[in-house]
Image (tube, rainbow, N blue to C red):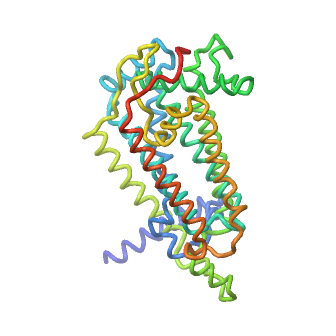
Amino acid sequence: MAAGAAAIQGGRWRRVWEAIDERLGLSGLAYPVPTHANGIGYILGGITFFGVLVLAGTGIWLAQFYHPTPGTARESVVYIMNVAPLGDIVRGVHFWVSNIVMATVLLHLGRVFVTGSYKRPREGNWLIGLGLLGVTLGLIFTGTVLKWDQEGYEALGHNIEAGNLLGSFGFWFSPEFETSLPILGRLYVAHIAILPAIGVLLLAVHFLLVKRHGISSRPAQADLAVDGGPAPARGGSTFTAHLARMAGFGLIMLAAATVLSLVAPAGLGDRPIPGTETTKPPWMFLPFYPFEDWFGLPALLWIPAILFGALALVPFVDRNPYRSPRRRRLFIAIGAAVAIAAVILVAYAFATVPQAHVQEAV
């Protein structure tokens, strides 16, 4: 009897879905999903997307209480932390999910690199992924500034100095670009509108390309096809199972961020003191920090430019049709060297004492 009731209920939900799908065509978004795509390595992109949705939701809530002016920004953050309903928890979830998303973006990029999933015909999606990495870094940078504590103030100082180094091309980063609106307000607009709009556009193209080319097969299967074997199967699982798997991992991420927001709330530094530098950037920017010590502020422009430029060239330099790491030893070795160097640079940055790099420019 219970089984019959469940079947009736399932039939009702199926009819509801069919009615919705008839009008919106949601089933057109589906694409074949191989079984291995439900593994954690191939689902990092989906976890990242779920995190983006959480960031959008919590960000909308935080925006109701934030004042993007130098005189009131930090005080509005204090209000969020101490007065606004569930303010400290929502802000903590926003903070921790942004860190988790940064980690999953890097891990996803690493998985694509190791498995050679950037190879033909997926070169375009690799470039879009680099664009999404840049947007993620931009969101974290602008979010750091918006706190308007000592760390945020120093980050804004670096932003202005980088604009000065770009000359006429850095006009948007100059406080003189529009004197009626403080640059903090422009970075707020970038954080809540410009960068999210760019990210949504890139995500839409990314998903369309995944639908067109399918989820990349395992390297061994792809290499077998190169050697004249059968083409890798594009199916094996279902699109709904794939979405459920992504949502499950996403809920785990949300739960972890909620717990972290309770045991380690997002902090807020002291009021900014002009003319001083006492902080270091968030962990994702630390690999660049030692270069600023060694070569000065220009290194903050040309080191990331070199890194992103080299990554953009990867699909066009690695023309070997094989994808297995053992058949791409040179590129795997270079990638491993870069990853190890980044870890060493982070450790070095943690161990060094902050130095003054910028003049008072805010």
Decide if residue 125 is on the left or right side of residue 2: right
Measuring from the top left, give residue 64's x and y in whole percent: 46, 26
Q: Residue furthest front?
A: 294
Number of disc labels: 0
Q: Quadrant of the C terminus?
A: top right
Residue 150, picture quadrant: top left
Give the residue at x 43% y 50%: 343
Nearest to the observer: residue 88 or residue 285: 285
Q: Quadrant of the N terminus?
A: bottom left
Vertical relation: 254 (above or below) 195: below
Decide if residue 240 is on the left or right side of residue 320: left
Give the residue at x 65% y 57%: 126
Measuring from the top left, give residue 197's x and y in whole percent: 63, 39
Nearest to the observer: residue 203 or residue 228: 228
Q: Residue furthest bottom?
A: 229
Give the residue at x 33% y 29%: 85
Vertical relation: 329 (above or below) 83: below
Q: Residue furthest left?
A: 263
Give the residue at x 35% y 20%: 270
Measuring from the top left, give residue 123's x and y in whole percent: 70, 61
Measuring from the top left, give residue 288's x and y in whole percent: 52, 39
Vertical relation: 168 (above or below) 246: above
Residue 182, picture quadrant: top right
